[in-house]
Image (cartoon, helix red, strand yellow):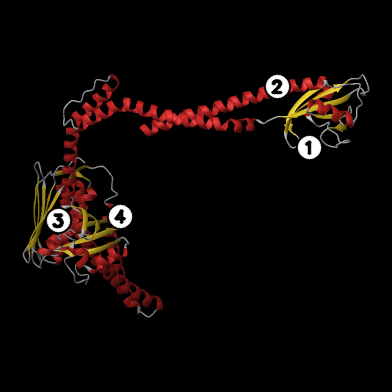
C-alpha cells in the first residue's frame, strides 16, 4: 500500500509540475510575442518616408533597429531586403503581407524560409508621402524563441523541482502510510491471533471492519464444520457409488479412489495400483496417452474400464454384466432367428422355383402350396412377435377394467387342438368376476404366451392347470407338468431372445420373445411376475395383479 500511495503522490505532483511548467511556458511565450510586437511597432516609427525606397535604405534602417527590413511593392514584390538579395521575389502569400495589404498592417510568427529561424514580422502599408510610392509595404522582423525553446531553457529548474518533489513525497508517504496503516496492521494481527475472541479497535473508522471480522470469526467454526460435513458426504457418495472411479497422475500417485474401485483394483493406500503395471494392455493404454475402453472379468462379473487420460487421468469402472449378457442373448436370438427364417425361406424359394419352372406335376402343386403357406405363416409369426415386443414401449393408450375370468374362457377354446395333439389334460380353477385395470390386448398377449408355453414345453399326456383368484390382489397361475427349468434357465427365462429349446428344428415354434413380452407388460402395469420350476417336473408362472404404483 505504501508503494501505491507513493506512486500516486509522485504521479500527481510530477504531472502537476509538468502542467504548470507548460502553462508558464505558454504564458511567457505569449508575453514574449506581445513584447516583440510592441518592439516592432517602435522600430516602425524609425522609418523615414522621405528616404529612398532602395536596398541601401533598407540596410541603413536595419542597422538602426537591428531588425530584418524588407521593402515591397503594393503587390508584395520585394524591392529590397536587408538580410538577403531576394529582389523581384513576391511575398504576397505571407500572412503579415496579406494582412497589411488588406488592413494596413499585419503581424505573423513563423519560421523564416530565408533566415532559417523562428521570427515575428510586422508589415505596414505606406499610403503615400515622401519618396515612397503609395501602397508600398515595409516589413520589419526579429528572431523569437519558440515555446519549446522556452521549455528547454526552463528544464534544469523543472528537474530540480522534480527531485525535491520526490524527496518530499517519500517522506510524506512514509509518514502518512505509517499513520494510516499502523491501526489496520494492529487490527489484522489481533484478528489473526483472536482464536474466537472478539476483535476491538479504538478508531471509529475501523470499527465497521472490526465488526465484520467478529462476524467472520463467529461464523468460521460453522463454515469449517460444513466443509468437514461436505467432505464426509462427498466421501460417502463416492463410496456408495455402484461404479468405481479413480483419479490419478501416475500408477503410484492416486489422487482419489472410491471403495468400489479400490476393491476391484486391489488397491491399498499409498501403494501403486497393481493393475496399471501387471496388466500389459492397461500399461500400453497409459503409455500411449490416448483415452480408451477395456473390458475385464472380475469374479463372475464383467466390467468396462474407461480410461480418460489427461491432467489428471480418470478411470471409470462400470459393471456391464447385464448389458453383455443381453448382448449374448441377442446374439443367440440372431442365430436362432436366422436359422428360423432360413429354413422356411429356403422351402418357399425352392418350391416356388420348381412351380415357376413348370417342373412339378399338377397333383403335387397343391401340397407344395400348403408347405409354402405353412412356412409363410411361421415367418409372419416371427415378425409379429418382434413387432409386438417393440410396440409395448410406444403404447400410451389408457387402461380400463378388463374381466380376466371371461377373457380366459374366451381364449382357452382356441388351444383345444394343441391340447388334444399332445394329449394334455386341462384343469381350470377360475373364479368368476375377477377384474383388473389394463387393456384387453395386453392381457390376451400375456395369456396366449403363458398357455402356449405350458403346452409347447409339456410332456405327452401331461396336464396344464390355469388358476385365477380374486380379492384385493388377484392372482393368475399357469402350471404345467413339462420339462421344467434348470437353475440357469430360471435366471434367464425372461431375457429377450432366450429360448430353452436350443435345437432350432422349429418343432417348438418359439422365438424367445414370448416370456420377455409377458415380463415387459407386467413391469409396465406394476404387476409381480414369478416363476417356480423343478427340472423334469414342470413349471408354474405366477402373476400377482398388484395395484399399479404412482409414477
- Vertical side of 152 occupied by 530: above or below: below
* Comes first in the chain, label 2 or label 3: 2
Q: Which residue is under mark 1?
A: 114
Q: CA distance from mark 2 to mark 4?
A: 78 Å
Comparing marks 2 and 4, which lies closer to the viewer?
2
Q: CA distance from mark 1 to mark 2?
A: 23 Å
Looking at the image, residue 52 sits to the left or right of residue 198; the answer is: right
Q: Is residue 17 visible?
A: yes
Give coordinates of residue 300: x percent, y percent: 14, 63
* Depth check, front residue: 128 or 55: 55
Q: Is residue 511 visible?
A: no
Q: Which mark is residue 35?
A: 2
* Depth check, front residue: 77 or 267: 77
Q: Secondary structure at mark 4?
A: loop
* Comes first in the chain, label 1 or label 2: 2
10 Å crowding of disc 4: few (<14), some (14-19), many (20+): few
Q: Secondary structure at mark 3?
A: loop
10 Å crowding of disc 1: few (<14), some (14-19), many (20+): few
Q: Which residue is under mark 3?
A: 269
Q: Secondary structure at mark 1?
A: loop
* Depth check, front residue: 89 or 231: 89
* Comes first in the chain, label 4 or label 3: 3
Q: Which residue is under mark 4?
A: 311
- Vertical side of 15 occupied by 470: above or below: below
Say which quarter of the image contains residue 539: bottom left
Q: CA distance from mark 2 to mark 3?
A: 94 Å
Q: Secondary structure at mark 2?
A: helix
Amino acid at each position: 500500500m505504501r508503494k501505491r500511495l507513493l506512486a500516486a503522490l509522485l504521479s500527481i505532483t510530477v504531472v502537476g509540475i509538468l502542467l504548470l511548467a507548460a502553462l508558464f511556458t505558454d504564458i511567457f511565450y505569449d508575453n514574449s510575442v506581445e513584447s516583440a510586437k510592441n518592439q516592432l511597432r517602435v522600430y516602425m516609427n524609425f522609418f523615414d518616408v522621405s528616404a529612398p525606397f532602395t536596398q541601401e535604405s533598407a540596410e541603413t534602417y536595419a542597422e538602426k533597429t537591428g531588425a530584418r527590413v524588407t521593402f515591397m511593392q503594393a503587390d508584395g514584390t520585394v524591392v529590397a531586403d536587408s538580410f538577403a538579395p531576394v529582389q523581384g521575389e513576391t511575398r504576397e502569400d505571407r500572412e503579415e503581407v496579406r494582412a497589411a495589404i488588406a488592413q494596413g498592417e499585419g503581424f505573423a510568427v513563423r519560421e523564416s524560409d530565408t533566415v532559417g529561424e523562428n521570427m515575428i514580422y510586422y508589415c505596414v502599408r505606406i499610403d503615400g508621402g515622401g519618396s515612397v510610392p503609395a501602397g508600398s509595404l515595409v516589413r520589419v522582423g526579429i528572431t523569437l524563441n519558440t515555446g519549446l525553446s522556452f521549455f528547454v531553457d526552463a528544464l534544469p529548474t523543472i528537474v530540480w523541482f522534480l527531485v525535491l518533489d520526490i524527496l518530499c513525497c517519500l517522506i510524506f508517504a512514509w509518514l502518512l502510510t505509517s499513520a494510516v496503516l499502523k491501526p489496520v496492521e494492529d487490527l489484522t494481527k489481533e484478528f489473526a491471533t483472536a482464536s474466537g475472541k472478539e476483535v476491538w479497535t479504538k478508531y471509529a473508522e475501523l470499527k465497521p471492519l472490526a465488526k465484520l471480522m467478529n462476524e467472520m470469526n463467529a461464523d468460521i467454526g460453522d463454515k469449517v464444520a460444513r466443509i468437514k460435513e461436505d467432505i464426509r458426504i462427498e466421501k460417502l457418495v463416492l463410496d456408495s457409488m455402484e461404479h468405481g472411479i479413480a483419479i490419478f497422475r501416475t500408477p503410484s500417485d492416486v489422487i482419489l479412489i472410491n471403495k468400489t474401485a479400490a476393491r476391484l483394483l486391489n488397491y491399498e493406500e499409498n501403494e501403486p495400483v497393481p493393475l496399471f503395471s501387471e496388466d500389459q494392455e492397461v500399461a500400453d493404454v497409459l503409455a500411449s496417452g490416448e483415452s480408451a475402453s477395456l473390458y475385464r472379468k472380475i469374479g463372475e462379473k464383467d466390467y468396462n474400464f474407461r480410461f480418460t487420460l489427461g491432467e489428471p487421468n480418470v478411470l471409470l469402472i462400470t459393471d456391464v454384466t447385464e448389458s453383455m449378457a443381453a448382448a449374448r442373448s441377442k446374439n443367440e436370438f440372431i442365430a436362432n432367428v436366422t436359422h428360423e427364417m432360413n429354413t422356411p425361406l429356403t422351402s418357399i424359394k425352392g418350391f416356388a422355383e420348381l412351380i415357376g419352372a413348370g417342373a412339378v406335376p399338377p397333383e403335387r402343386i397343391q401340397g407344395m402350396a400348403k408347405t409354402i403357406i405353412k412356412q409363410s405363416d411361421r415367418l409372419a409369426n416371427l415378425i409379429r412377435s418382434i413387432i409386438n415386443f417393440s410396440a409395448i414401449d410406444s403404447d400410451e393408450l389408457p387402461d380400463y377394467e378388463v374381466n380376466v375370468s371371461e377373457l380366459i374362457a374366451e381364449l382357452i377354446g382356441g388351444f383345444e387342438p394343441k391340447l388334444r395333439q399332445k394329449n394334455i389334460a386341462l384343469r381350470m380353477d377360475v373364479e368368476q368376476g375377477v377384474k383388473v385395470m389394463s387393456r384387453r390386448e395386453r392381457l390376451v398377449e400375456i395369456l396366449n404366451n403363458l398357455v402356449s408355453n405350458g403346452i409347447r414345453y409339456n410332456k405327452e399326456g401331461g396336464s396344464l392347470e390355469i388358476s385365477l383368484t380374486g380379492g384385493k390382489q388377484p392372482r393368475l397361475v399357469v402350471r404345467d407338468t413339462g420339462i421344467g427349468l434348470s437353475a440357469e434357465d430360471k435366471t434367464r427365462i425372461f431375457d429377450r431372445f432366450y429360448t430353452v429349446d436350443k435345437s432350432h428344428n422349429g418343432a417348438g415354434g418359439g422365438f424367445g420373445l414370448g416370456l420377455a413380452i409377458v415380463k415387459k407388460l407386467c413391469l409396465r402395469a406394476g404387476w409381480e411376475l414369478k416363476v417356480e420350476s423343478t427340472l423334469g417336473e414342470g413349471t408354474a408362472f405366477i402373476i400377482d395383479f398388484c395395484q399399479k404404483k404412482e409414477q
